Image (spheres, helix red, strand yellow):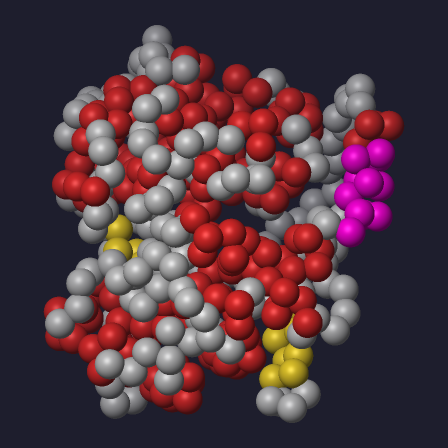
């Protein structure tokens, strides 16, 4: 980036011992995960595609719709058909990576994951998983994020009335990578380029939207708005609570925001710690919160307080650059009942000002109570 940092290295021979009272339980959980035939192993995150479509949470045709009539052609089942071997990160029992290929099309890639299926499938009006795989492979080879790239390509397709033109999709992806032709402007992303193409600005804080549409999953909509890095579904990761069959014990009505801000604060705090510890968020299905805390030689309340400080430091950074409540919004905020009230509740839970700014205290210097709604400056 701007700092010119190319790499970070760590060296040393120090070791740390963690006293765990659940090694047998952990081994059993790992063994069960490793031997299970879960849908995530078979289809990866693409397994949620048809569910998102069914409930009206699958962005389609550059966000003009929330379901896609061609979903069967880009479903998790179609992705599974293209899987040719098992794939996993080192030592991971979850194994959600999907090495896929289509010999006839001459394409071999990893995935596509749900977000790529959304960005280069439904949002682009493309209904063939092989075409999504081709776009995914291109982005991987050219070093581009499939969500941001897919969204800006979908924006262009809307402006040209070319939804479903998979050949044009691949051409535009290459033009963006090399900043050639129309790709030179599209390479700036949706936020900077939308005006030139007469399109709506489907971003939060300049970041393009991922899937799990907040017009149906209202808590996820709030999470998109409050996320310090913009419309990223994994920052607050609220959508699992609002899908049926996902985390059924904690399932929430997707409509409305009553009671959701406290849960969002807790989830943001937790994810901030996971990001800082470089831990995959899918570990939630294997390791409990208390076990995670034990691994870090802390208790869960400590981790919540740490996460609250991280989130607040990020917010202070954004505030210093002019971001405030006006930026914690959505293109469809007025469609979500109680959005502004819930946003104010969220700020109050974090102990922030109602304009979305951090109060006059050392950024991040908040107490253990920050996750329970009484954030105060430490003495």
Residue at screen point 32% across, 78% down: 163
- Secondary structure mostly seen in magenta is helix
Left or right, 335 with respect to 15, comes to: left
> How far across and how far down the image is residue 355, in percent?
15, 30
Q: Position of 4 compared to 155: left or right?
A: right
Q: Is residue 213 left or right of residue 39?
A: left
Total labels drawn: 0
The front one of 149 and 156 is 156
Q: Residue 300, how many percent across, how many down?
A: 57, 20
Foreground of the two, 91 or 30:
30
| Region of the chain picked out in magenta, as a range | 27-37
- In the figure, residue 342 lies in which quadrant? top left
322 shown above or below 56: above
Q: Residue at x 40, y 51 (%)?
A: 57
- Quadrant hosting residue 53: bottom left
Going 35% across and 8% down the picture, which residue do you hit? 379
For residue 368, which quarter of the picture?
top left
- Where in the figure is residue 58, as x and y percent of width and height? 41, 57
Asked whether residue 124 appears in the rendered view, the answer is yes
Quadrant, the N terminus: bottom left
Residue pictured at 60% horizontal, 89% vertical: 105
Q: Residue 364: in sight, yes or no? A: no
Horizontal and vertical percent for residue 81?
Answer: 68, 72
Residue 38 within the segment the image draws in magenta: no
Note whether 126 is above or below 205 in the view shown. below
Q: Nearer the viewer, residue 36 or 88?
A: 36
Whether 148 is drawn above or below 357: the answer is below
Would residue 45 be found to the left or right of residue 350 on screen?
right
């Amino acid at each position: 980036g701007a700092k010119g940092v190319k790499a970070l290295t760590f060296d040393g021979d120090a070791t740390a011992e963690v006293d765990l009272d659940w090694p047998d339980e952990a081994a059993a959980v790992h063994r069960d995960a490793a031997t299970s035939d879960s849908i995530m192993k078979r289809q990866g995150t693409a397994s949620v595609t048809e569910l998102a479509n069914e409930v009206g949470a699958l962005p389609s045709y550059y966000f003009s719709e929330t379901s896609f009539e061609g979903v069967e052609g880009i479903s998790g089942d179609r992705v599974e058909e293209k899987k040719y071997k098992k794939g996993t990160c080192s030592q991971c029992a979850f194994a959600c990576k999907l090495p896929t290929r289509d010999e006839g099309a001459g394409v071999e890639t990893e995935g596509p994951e749900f977000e790529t299926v959304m960005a280069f499938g439904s949002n682009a009006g493309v209904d063939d998983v092989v075409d999504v795989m081709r776009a995914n492979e291109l982005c991987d080879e050219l070093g581009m994020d499939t969500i941001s790239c897919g969204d800006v390509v979908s924006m262009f397709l809307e402006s040209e009335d070319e939804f479903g033109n998979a050949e044009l999709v691949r051409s535009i992806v290459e033009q963006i990578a090399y900043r050639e032709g129309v790709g030179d402007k599209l390479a700036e992303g949706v936020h900077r380029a939308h005006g030139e193409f007469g399109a709506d600005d489907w971003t939060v804080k300049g970041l393009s939207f991922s899937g799990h549409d907040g017009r149906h999953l209202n808590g996820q909509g709030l999470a998109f708005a409050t996320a310090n890095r913009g419309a990223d579904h994994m920052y607050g990761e609220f959508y699992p609570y609002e899908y049926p069959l996902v985390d059924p014990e904690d399932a929430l009505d997707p409509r409305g925001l009553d009671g959701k801000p406290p849960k969002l604060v807790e989830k943001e705090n937790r994810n901030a710690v996971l990001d800082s510890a470089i831990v995959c968020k899918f570990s939630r299905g294997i390791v409990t919160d208390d076990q995670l805390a034990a691994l870090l030689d802390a208790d869960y309340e400590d981790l919540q307080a740490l996460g609250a400080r991280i989130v607040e430091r990020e917010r202070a950074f954004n505030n210093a650059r002019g971001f405030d409540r006006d930026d914690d919004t959505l293109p469809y905020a007025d469609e979500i009942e109680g959005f502004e009230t819930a946003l104010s509740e969220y700020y109050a839970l974090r102990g922030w000002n109602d304009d979305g700014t951090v109060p006059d205290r050392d950024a991040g210097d908040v107490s253990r109570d920050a996750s329970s709604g009484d954030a105060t400056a430490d003495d």
